[in-house]
Image (spheres, grey):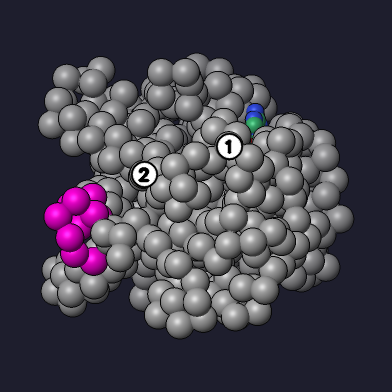
Amino acid sequence: MGSSSAGLRLTVMGLGYLGLTHAVCLAEMGHEVLALDVDQQKVRRAAGGEAPFFEPGLEPLLRKNLEAGRLRFTSAYEAIAQFGDVHFLCVGTPPTADGAADLRQVHAATDAVAQHLGKRSLLVGKSTVPVGTARALAARIRAAAPAGDQVEMAWNPEFLREGHAVADSLAPDRLVFGVTSTWAAGLLRQVYAQPLGAGCPGLVMELETAELVKVAANAFLATKISFINAMAEMCETVGGDVVQLAEAIGYDERIGHRCLAPGLGFGGGCLPKDIRAFIATARNRGVTSVAGLLAEVDEINLGRRARVTDLVRDAAGGSLAGKRVAVLGLAFKPGSDDVRDSPSLDVCGRLIGEGAIVSAHDPVAMPNAARVSPDLRYAPSVSAAAEDADVVMHLTEWADYRAIDPAALMSIVAHPVIIDARCALDAERWRAAGWTFRMPGRQAR
Ligand SMILES: NC(=O)c1ccc[n+]([C@@H]2O[C@H](COP(=O)([O-])OP(=O)(O)OC[C@H]3O[C@@H](n4cnc5c(N)ncnc54)[C@H](O)[C@@H]3O)[C@@H](O)[C@H]2O)c1
């Protein structure tokens, strides 16, 4: 094993949210890391100590490990093949038009590294892939690598959450090792010696189970969110308050309060694409229970965006044409600048489609949002967004927005009406200041 006394020599392919965080955290655990991307700009920025996306706490750790000499960046596959014996695959698996996972980045990266693998090596997949991918890749790599059968494949799915990525990577709640040999399991135990030593469970299993653990975990979380949003629809229809309902059922520890926030539903670069890819796999394999359950979860989730649009239209008097709508929050969730499949941007598009003039604010996601939605007006502050607004919409639950003084904002807007699509603001405080306060999951009062 080519290792220094401080740690192993590891490589990481792909410098997105997953790969850069993983590379930095492996270096922080004491390993020597060489990380690669085909995007030269990402490589240059990372090597200069700059994260190409917003993730709390990542940049200081990136700089610290660059300075310590444990972390370097490259775009040369030959360099990573020579540098390390354990190679982590962290490239993207975006959706195809029919919702299945597009494995082109995975194939391009594994083909590119395989041709240089002349010694015993372990390739470790971390990307989220359809079950069966790892075993198929193992055969593909063995056929292409000069070292042939000496190259093994393992799957070690990643569970980090954007906004908490550093803590989730340094102190994961579990580590999953899909392997085909004790050698691979042993190497992964060395890689993660630090969190395992701190008590993190390390679960060794077959490749297929490891691949499925990731998509099953995402499917369960998505189901929980859509469940509470289905209850929101019930409350809206028959009367009731879904926030109180969620609080009450969550005290049952078999249910729990986490992932039980009603409102606009989930989005982002992972959950929606992962459940759709899982649906596609389940359909292909004829597992109708999984396909049917998750199709319903997806539909309930997307239905929330239409429901919130209905709420704002009602609040604006039945038509959005020419109405000024202030939008607070664009990221798919707080703590991130990621706007991939952002529920907020989806709602903004619907508002514009109905003729509204949308003025939006987000603490960090406006540059990314402007790239995909250039037709929104971007405001430098909450008060600039709310100026002369007919309706204010709270679409991403940043802590900054809970700190807004409703009385101060009242003097800026044209009409003091707010839709809290995330059910996260203090309704009584806003009402006491004179606002009309509406949220999904409760009949209008
Ligand atoms: N973002 C998350 O929170 C998260 C969490 C867990 C798992 N995942 C999974 O991790 C994977 C990556 O997700 P992401 O959000 O980091 O994606 P991303 O799109 O942000 O990053 C992918 C990176 O791979 C690079 N890349 C593309 N082709 C390459 C190649 N041939 N060689 C080297 N690099 C290449 C791209 O330039 C990009 O920097 C996906 O499968 C995703 O589902 C993501």
Give the camera-side residue of 220 and 375: 375
Secondary structure, mark 1, is: loop
Residue 434 image point, x, y percent: 50, 77
> Which marked residue is nearer to the observer: mark 2 or mark 1?
1
34 horizontally vs 289: left or right:
right
Local packing at callout 1 (Cα closer than 10 Å; few below 14, some 14-19, many 20+) is: some
User: Which of disc 1 and disc 2 is earlier in sequence?
Assistant: 2
Q: Quadrant location of the C terminus? A: bottom left
Give the dominant element type of the magenta stretch: helix, strand or loop.
helix
Give the camera-side residue of 311 and 42: 311
Q: Which residues are magenta?
A: 232-241
Say which quarter of the image contains residue 98.
Answer: top left
Q: Residue at x 41, y 24 (%)?
A: 99
Q: Are marks 2 and 1 in contact (CB under 8 Å)?
A: no
Q: Which residue is disc 2 drawn over? A: 307
Q: Residue at x 58, y 27 (%)?
A: 105
Residue 423 image point, x, y percent: 39, 65
